[in-house]
């Protein structure tokens, strides 16, 4: 396992001009150390909870609650048919109070408040805690909880995650290591996308022997409050929260075109339509995907008139709408 490259004193231009083009993870030191929220977190768990509650609009948020027996690892039941935690809806304040009440419990329930839309739940927070590396159109999402382990998974978007309180350890793997990470089910998942079935803290190499290769290609970093990490789209990342009260803000962008179609949805569609064809037919379709989608032989249709409005050249907005309606109808 390698250390994620560390960057310091990064500004907007360096982030977009140097870091993002590398398409590699980046551990960016103290990019939000100036935030009032980070300063509150440095005082005590009580101080950061008080700070967040002052901004709470009392809208409900999603919470995950796991029995102490899971030891913070949000995952599956042994038969993989269900998850090992429960989901609930609570206000931010109730969730924060619960974290404080159990912070000294030696064997607590695992609690995680997930994917909190900051602009809706804490409308004044962003004005006081502004991200210096991204455009203001990219809104923040908050994640908080106690000591927890999230299995390696991927996002379709680029991701900049910033630690506000506590510490978080990130373990990343390149997209090309997917077969060595042993992805789990596609439909029942802890967080919407498949996760690695390997316990990366205690890998069972007898059951998952190829993980040894993924581990060689892996990168890791432990982030302190104020630090950020850039995770390129589709990089697998596992996250371990190391304190009794942890707060993280992240920002997603890119990963989808203006057509508004998720590549992950397209992947599942292709798995249903092509995945179980004969090997000969799958191989034949690979040529079509290479030509039209992955463009391994250059831009498809470059011999066609530039002004032609077509899927192989450039769709008009009206054609996009019509095609999406057609594809939706075909799935019924």
Image (tube, grey):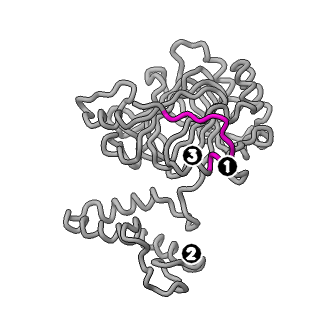
Q: For this view, does 176 lie left or right of residue 17? A: left
List the residue tagged with mark 1.
13
Res. 150 visible in picture: no
- Say which residue appears at 48% left-offset and 25% top-offset: 72
**Where's residue 91, x and y in %?**
69, 35
List the residue tagged with mark 3.
19
List the residue tagged with mark 2.
321
Q: CA distance from mark 2 to mark 1?
A: 36 Å
- Say which residue appears at 45% left-offset and 78% top-offset: 312
**Where's residue 217, x and y in %?**
37, 37
- Residue 55 sits in which quadrant? top right
In reply to whether residue 11 is colored magenta, the answer given is yes
Q: Nearer the viewer, residue 152 or 332?
A: 152
Q: CA distance from mark 2 to mark 3?
A: 35 Å
The mark nearer the N terminus, 3 or 1, is: 1
What residue range appears in magenta? 4-16
Q: For this view, does 263 lie left or right of residue 78? A: right
In reply to whether residue 246 is colored magenta, the answer given is no
Q: For this view, does 195 lie left or right of residue 18? A: left
**Labels 2, 3: front one:** 3
């Amino acid at each position: 396992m390698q250390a994620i490259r560390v960057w310091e004193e990064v500004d907007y231009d360096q982030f977009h001009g140097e870091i993002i083009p590398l398409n590699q993870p980046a551990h960016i030191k103290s990019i939000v150390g100036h935030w009032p929220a980070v300063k509150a977190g440095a005082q005590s768990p009580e101080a950061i909870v008080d700070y967040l509650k002052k901004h709470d609009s009392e809208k409900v948020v999603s919470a995950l609650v796991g029995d102490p027996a899971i030891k913070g690892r949000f995952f599956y039941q042994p038969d993989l048919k269900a998850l090992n935690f429960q989901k609930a809806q609570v206000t931010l304040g109730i969730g924060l109070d619960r974290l404080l009440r159990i912070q000294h419990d030696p064997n607590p329930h695992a609690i995680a408040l997930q994917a909190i839309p900051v602009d809706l739940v804490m409308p004044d927070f962003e004005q006081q805690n502004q991200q210096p590396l991204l455009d203001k159109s990219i809104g923040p999402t908050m994640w908080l909880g106690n000591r927890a382990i999230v299995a390696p998974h991927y996002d379709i978007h680029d991701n900049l995650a910033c630690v506000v309180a506590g510490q978080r350890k990130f373990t990343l793997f390149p997209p090309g290591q997917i077969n060595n990470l042993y992805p789990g089910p596609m439909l029942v998942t802890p967080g919407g996308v498949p996760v690695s079935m390997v316990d990366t803290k205690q890998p069972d190499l007898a059951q998952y022997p190829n993980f040894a290769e993924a581990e060689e290609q892996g990168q890791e970093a432990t982030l302190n409050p104020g630090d950020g990490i850039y995770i390129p789209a589709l990089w697998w990342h596992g996250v371990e929260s190391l304190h009794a009260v942890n707060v993280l803000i992240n920002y997603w962008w890119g990963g989808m075109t203006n057509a508004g179609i998720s590549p992950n949805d397209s992947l599942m569609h292709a798995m249903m339509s092509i995945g179980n064809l004969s090997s000969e037919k799958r191989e034949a379709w690979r040529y079509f995907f290479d030509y039209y989608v992955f463009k391994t032989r250059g831009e498809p249709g470059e011999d066609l008139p530039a002004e032609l409005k077509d899927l192989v050249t450039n769709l008009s907005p009206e054609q996009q709408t019509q095609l999406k309606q057609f594809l939706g109808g075909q799935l019924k």
